[in-house]
Image (tube, grey):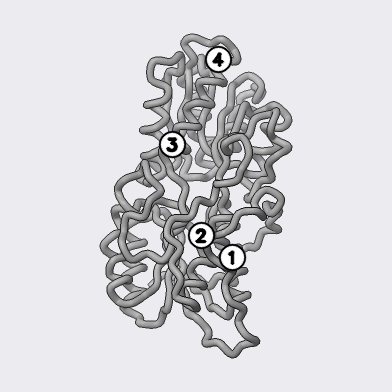
């Protein structure tokens, strides 16, 4: 069974509290204090999307912090961008009989539904975070009965905002057509599927014309290679749209080609420190926010409360109180603080 202790995970200096301190679990109190060690130590399994991912690091770090403060021992299982592996890891957790609770962060929700149902049937308390656990990527509502909380972003809503920003970026230069390079992150993941579908729906009938596609695997080095190939084959690219990790790779490819970021319209999603800073200085047109640290905190708080006090929290929106509908523009960049490095 592949797993890694969370002690091996890098901890971020999470500065996102300025933007997210006001967020709270709807209708619940903070988890109970550990009572000076009098309460039984909880055993919790954390089924990660991918441990070696800069977006996931602060999510896990915040979950670990809350677990540490509430006498809970966290064991991390690395899905490593493989939905089948995630299903196997969940089955291993159930078979071990060692865990009171489990947090799942799906890569592709439909692929692990049966495994999570097995965990619930075995009496394990489960909280879903970040990605949709189910096959409807247009809704943040719980799709598997029995979860103690569902703390997610909706991929189609993110894709809608992403598409709207691409349209606005092209309009800012009066480009028609506007030749766009679209970099998927992981084509088989739920979030990439939902993003792509919503992006196409929003941009249909507009000057936005996707003339090239690539894949980043949320890795700047992979994105650099993909963008270098795209720029060689498509010298008329006007805009590049992708995740923040993808934009980092794009910036490297652009520089290596002897060009400037200002030669392209760049639209990102992630809301990382890198993204926020580059929107602020004008080198990136806009960036759609994501909040991994907030998500990890809210998910673990809900799980601890469910285990200690029997409280279920239902659907929790980690983005409820962010400004400008969660879209970072040059005019609004100073209202945001990135929750992850990028």
User: Taking 299 as reference, is 335 above or below it?
Assistant: above
Q: Nearer the viewer, mark 3 or mark 4?
A: 4
Q: CA distance from mark 3 to mark 1?
A: 26 Å
Write down the residue under mark 3: 184
Which residue is nearer to you in this view: 266 or 168?
168
Residue 319: % across, % down = 55, 47
263 displayed left or right of 138:
right
Q: For numbered disc 1, what is the local secondary structure?
A: loop
Q: Earlier in the sequence, mark 3 or mark 1?
A: 1
Q: Is residue 129 visible?
A: yes
In this view, the residue farthest toward the front is: 27
Q: Residue at x 28, y 73 (%)?
A: 121
Classify mark 2: residues with Cα within 10 Å, few (<14), some (14-19) or many (20+): many
- Marks 3 and 4: CB-CB under 8 Å? no
Q: CA distance from mark 4 to mark 1?
A: 42 Å
50 displayed left or right of 275:
left
Write down the residue under mark 1: 9
Q: CA distance from mark 4 to mark 2?
A: 38 Å
Q: Earlier in the sequence, mark 3 or mark 4?
A: 4
Write down the residue under mark 2: 51
Q: Earlier in the sequence, mark 2 or mark 1?
A: 1
């Amino acid at each position: 069974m592949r797993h890694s202790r969370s002690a091996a995970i890098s901890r971020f200096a999470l500065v996102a509290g300025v933007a997210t301190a006001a967020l709270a679990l709807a209708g619940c109190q903070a988890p109970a204090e550990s009572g000076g060690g009098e309460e039984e130590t909880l055993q919790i399994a954390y089924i990660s999307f991918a441990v070696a991912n800069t977006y996931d690091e602060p999510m896990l770090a915040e979950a670990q912090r809350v677990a540490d403060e509430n006498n809970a021992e966290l064991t991390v299982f690395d899905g490593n961008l493989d939905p089948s592996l995630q299903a196997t890891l969940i089955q291993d957790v159930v078979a071990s009989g060692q865990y009171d609770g489990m947090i799942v962060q799906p890569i592709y929700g439909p692929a692990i539904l049966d495994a999570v149902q097995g965990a619930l049937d075995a009496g394990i308390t489960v909280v879903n975070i970040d990605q949709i656990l189910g096959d409807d990527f247009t809704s943040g509502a719980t799709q598997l009965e029995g979860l103690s909380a569902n703390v997610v972003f909706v991929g189609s809503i993110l894709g809608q905002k992403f598409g709207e920003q691409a349209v606005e970026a092209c309009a800012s230069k009066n480009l028609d057509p506007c030749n766009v390079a679209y970099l998927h992150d992981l084509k088989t993941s739920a979030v990439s599927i939902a993003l792509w579908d919503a992006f196409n729906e929003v941009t249909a009938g507009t000057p936005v014309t996707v003339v090239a596609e690539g894949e980043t695997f949320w890795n700047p080095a992979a994105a650099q290679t993909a963008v270098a190939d795209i720029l060689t084959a498509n010298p008329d690219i006007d805009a590049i749209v992708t995740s923040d990790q993808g934009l980092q790779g794009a910036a490297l490819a652009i520089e290596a080609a002897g060009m400037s970021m200002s030669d392209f319209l760049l639209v990102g999603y992630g809301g990382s420190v890198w993204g926020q800073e580059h929107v602020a200085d004008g080198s990136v047109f806009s960036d759609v926010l994501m909040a991994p640290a907030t998500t990890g905190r809210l998910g673990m708080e809900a799980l601890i409360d469910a285990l200690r006090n029997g409280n279920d929290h239902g659907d929790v929106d980690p983005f409820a109180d962010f400004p400008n509908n969660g879209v970072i523009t040059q005019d609004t960049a100073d209202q945001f603080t990135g929750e992850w490095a990028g």
